Amino acid sequence: QFANNLMFTHVPPRGVIRIYTVSGQFVQQVTWDETDLSSSGDLSYNLRTREGNTVGAGLYVYVLHALGASNETIGTRTGKFVVIR
């Protein structure tokens, strides 16, 4: 099961993650609130594109926006991850 998911750990209770290829192509957007997180506060991403295809091997960049009570951005984090197939 974990082979097909990526876990974003220690995410805020509400937010949006946008995932891009290193060349800047938009891959997927994941929006969540506290009901979507695991009991340990982690967010699972199923490694699928907007079209429902599995992402290919490679390096990806993500931009995480923490959202406040009225959906305003209260913090941003940028990072990257690698998919190896």
Image (cartoon, grey):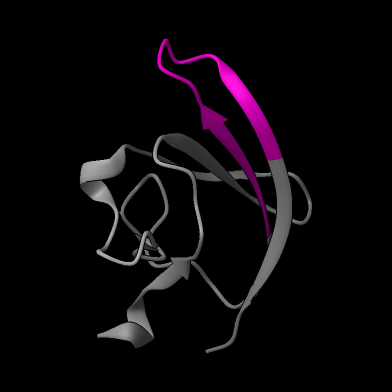
Q: In the rendered structure, does residue 40 fall within the stretch colored magenta?
A: no
Depth order, front residue of 80/24? 80
Residue 65, picture quadrant: top right
Residue 74, picture quadrant: top right
For residue 58, say whether it is visible. Answer: yes
Please provide the residue range marked out in magenta. 61-76
Q: Residue lying at the far left in this picture: please name it.
A: 35
Residue 5, picture quadrant: bottom left
Depth order, front residue of 19/53? 19
The location of residue 31, given as percent across then percent down, is: 38, 36
Magenta region's main secondary structure? strand
The location of residue 27, given as percent across then percent down, is: 53, 48
Depth order, front residue of 18/22? 18
Q: In the rendered structure, does residue 72 fall within the stretch colored magenta?
A: yes
Label tally? 0
Above or below 26: residue 3? below
The location of residue 78, given as percent across then percent down, is: 73, 48
For residue 59, say whether it is visible. Answer: no
Residue at (51% x, 59% y) in the render: 10
The location of residue 29, given as percent across then percent down, is: 46, 40
Residue at (34% x, 79% y) in the render: 4
Residue at (52% x, 42% y) in the render: 17
Above or below 72: residue 19? below
Q: Residue lying at the far top in this picture: please name it.
A: 70
Above or below 54: residue 4? below
Residue at (35% x, 47% y) in the render: 51
